[in-house]
Amino acid sequence: MRGPPPVPQNKPRSGRKLEAIKEQSYRVCEIFKSIQGEGNVIGRPSIFVRMYGCNLTCTWCDTKYSWMGPEKAKEGIDYVRMTPKQILHEISEVDASLVTITGGEPLLQPLEQLVKSLVEKGYEVLIETNGTIKPSEELQELVNIWSVSPKTSNAGFSIEYGELEWLQNVKDYYLKFVVVNPRKDTKEILAFLQERNINTSKVILQPDGTREDYVNAVKELMDFAKEGLQLRVLPQLHRLVWGHKRAV
């Protein structure tokens, strides 16, 4: 005699299906409140969510602790894992409407869940990125401001950028370039802009923030700009006020 038919098992159809319903978690380096010191939002109070990890190794990077030695990075020391709910809870008592998601390179992690959660809670979201990773269409629609910082050869390497055509789809953006040698670097920057037909009103130059004589670095760039350079120059406000420190 045949036995009874096997009882159907409620097995998931795929691992991806299970993964899709899980809340995303992020490698977060630090969360703090300060005054935005750069770009079009300079001077605004902001909550900063710094993600761990980067795909570049800029020589003058002022936040190397957010990406150096990734093969040795330890959870709980170099970063913590946080879900959107945990991040929202962390910042819920902070009096600021602007959230800056930065890095490292934040687009190495899928930010859609986090940004959507922030926007639903009424926050204005700014993402700082090096421009090497094209954001998803969902992110392009959700994010209020994009701060894009393309790298020139002064970063210590050569990189081929695309057209950055996705910038035409976003609500607002600006490009931010670090200048080490004003005369040499601005030639590269102007060529970069001309090749992509980017309006110079969207561009900000700022001096190398790791220089010990930072005020002189600002002066050198401003003096050069006075010669007729049609690009905006801004310092890092937090660098002038608090020096080269973490979480300021």
Image: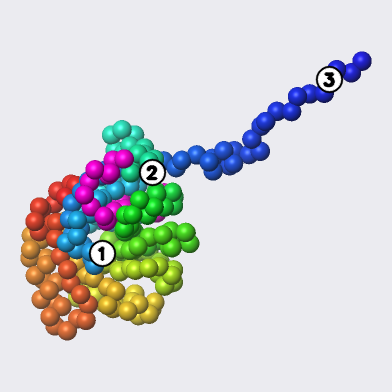
Q: x, y percentage for residue 162?
A: 43, 69
Residue extending furthest top?
1
Q: Which residues are magenta?
A: 89-109
Q: x, y percentage for residue 191?
A: 32, 78
| Sequence-earlier tag: 1 or 2 | 2
**Could you tell whether 46 is left or right of 112 in the image?**
left
- The secondary element bearing badge 3 is classed as loop
Task: Quote the CA–CA distance across marks 3 and 2.
Answer: 47 Å
- Give whichever of 97, 77 is nearer the camera: 97
Disc 2 designates what residue?
84
Disc 3 designates what residue?
4
Q: Amino acid at mark 3?
A: Pro
Measured along the vertical axis of the image, is residue 81 above or below residue 222?
Answer: above
| Sequence-earlier tag: 3 or 1 | 3
Disc 1 designates what residue?
154
Q: How is the image coloured?
A: rainbow
**Could you tell whether 168 is left or right of 96 in the image?**
right
